[in-house]
Amino acid sequence: MPRTRRTSSSQDSPTYESHFEHTALFEFSKVINSSLDLKFILSHILLTIMGKILSTKGMVLLETGKGRYVVETAKGFPSELQEAQLTIKRIPQSLFYVDKLRVSQYPWLASLKKHGVHILLPMFIAERPIGLLGFSERFSGKKLTTMEETYLRSLANISATAVEKSRTVSEIQQVNRKLDRKIQELNTLFDLGKEFGALLDPDKLVRLLVLSLLGQIGVNRYLICLRDGSDMKVAASRLDGPAPQGELLMKLASVKAATCVDDLVVKHDVDLREALLALGLRVVVPMQTQGQTKGLVLLGEKLSREVFSPVDLEFLSSLVNLAVISLENARLFQEAIEKQKLEDELLIAREIQKGLLPDVIPAIPGIEIAATNISSKQVGGDYYDVLSVDQHRHIIAIGDVSGKGTPAALLMANLQATIRALAPLDLSLSEFTQRVNDLMCRNTGGNKFVTFFWGVIDDRSRTLTYVNAGHNYPILLRSDGTSIRLDKGGMILGVLRTEVPYEQEVTQLKPGDLLVLFTDGVSEAMNKDAVEYGESRLEALLPSVRHCTAQEITDAIYKDVLHHTKGAAQSDDITMMVVKVH
Amino acid sequence: MSEFKIGVRETEGIHVLELKGYLDAHTAPKLEEAFTNLLTSNRYRIVVNCKDLSYISSAGLGVFMAYIEDVRKNQGDIKLSNMSPKVYNVFDLLGFPLLYEIFKEEREALRKFVDKTK
């Protein structure tokens, strides 16, 4: 009956106490199970028991795996005990006293005893120990009663489940966090993969790589180098000192996998590690494709001060390898564009050049003229022209513009325009040349020049009046077999304004005379052994072909040049003009 | 392509950047540009309001890292506010709360600047 029980309990002290203690146990359980905060739970366990048994010191040791225990919380003990570690192989199943056990059997007891631990209360989940509660002797010095011992065991059981629950939850939280972090890493790789693929500008790619590294790893010191031929060039950096140069970087190119600077082993070189550490760098990640190191990523310390873990290094390798593929693609793309641009430009130059050369050479009574221009791959800037000033006077001209490609072609066009514009004026060839030179000086700013030869053939007097402005001397092979070089004139065009007037010379042309004008593309045509064709070879050839037509002579010269070069690619245009006097 | 927008306003000499949308590898250069503009005109007290920021990638976080040193060297700071839990989680995962002050409300971030100058 309830009434009887209540009456009896108020009289019977142990039953009353037991009721009180059940309530307390329930309260205790409620409190420590209301939280997942391990610190709070442990602290509450210690304070409850210390209050119950009136002990001034208490500690909790928790099992961390393989019999290793760590002091998780301590009250009343010296602070250095916090986080102290202990290896406990065997542990009694229930409450025990340090004095009652033999240290020889439980060697780990010694250190606890030294700190004044007297009562030990193990926490078990089923048969598995999860921790140990330790307390100093009771303040009163009294022993625990059997009932108190039972009560403490109950507290230990309740504590064990609460502690286990809290630790499991926190473990799950940690696992979740690791998982979140992995997902974040994958997101980063995905995000960058997408973006890298769309970028073709290496500078932008490098910047994006930098930002991602800074954000993902949390670093603020970095050095990114890219291989450029046999050299490593710094592409981006933020360092505590000047960025390292070639040699040091090339040494690092031998690093085959992401490595912490501390673990760096580079043959015969201890300074390398020191040099990197001094710059604030902590990790080296090679950028590799097809077994080749295309670049390097070096990072400084994490702002969190954590060391780089193997997982970090793995992530860095993935990220960097992703980047290197895109960088490589960007580089190839740039190269292709450059090449295309160059080819387009050469095409333009070639077309300009072709457009400038006369389609038809005007017929001059008693004079036969043939000319040819074979432009090299780069388009050399050679020029020849034949035009009639009036019924009887005809200009022949040959020139070679410095430089190649479009700029040379444009200057050539400029020269031709000048000549054609000035031709109708009644000027001597010398004055004429001076005007052309001064105009060209103004137009080119003196950084380009033209070697130029021109002459006026008068078909009535059968004379050639010429000025040679620094051009290869044309060869005039007389009908009697003697040959002279047309070397009168002055300075090349386009460099300096005329100070000394150009000299002009008049030569009488006779039937059977052969005049050959050529550019250095003929005389300097080289074979594989870098031997030039040479003007003397040309001079030697002429007597044997002088009876041929002008066109045949041109062809013969070209054939002889080809015979010399034997298919070696020529870097300059080959241009010549042959004038036969009948 | 996802949208990303930045609004800039000034209160009491503090510049507030309002981020809206997706901050990822593609849009990070926009934020860089905004920071560069502030820094070149010597504005170093910056609050970044993330109220309408729906996503941030590591490249986006990298922008904060790239400018923080220069800002702090000039006695300024970049403080962050109004993050959604999803965005905060990314900041938290990568350890940013250690390096940046993150506030629930923009006005708390502003007050922190003002209090400091008093």
Image (cartoon, rainbow, N blue to C red):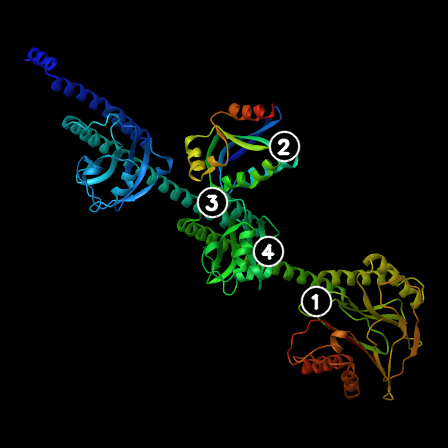
Where residue A42 sits: x, y (%)? 29, 31
Q: Which mark is residue A217?
A: 3
Q: Position of residue A33 (x, y in %)?
A: 26, 27
Q: Do we see residue A351 in this rendering?
A: yes
Relative to A168, is A87 above or below? below
Q: Nearer the viewer, residue A562 or A241?
A: A241
Q: Are marks 3 and 4 on the same chain?
A: yes
Residue indicated by mark 2: B43
**Which of the two discs, 1 and 3, sits closer to the camera?**
3
**Callout in the foreground (4, 2):** 4
Tag 1 or tag 4, which sits nearer the N-term? 4
Chain bearing mark 4:
A
* Element on which disc 3 rests: helix
Residue shown at the point (36%, 42%) measured from the top left: A178
Kindly identify which residue carries mark 1.
Answer: A379
The quarter of the displayed image where residue A459 is located? bottom right
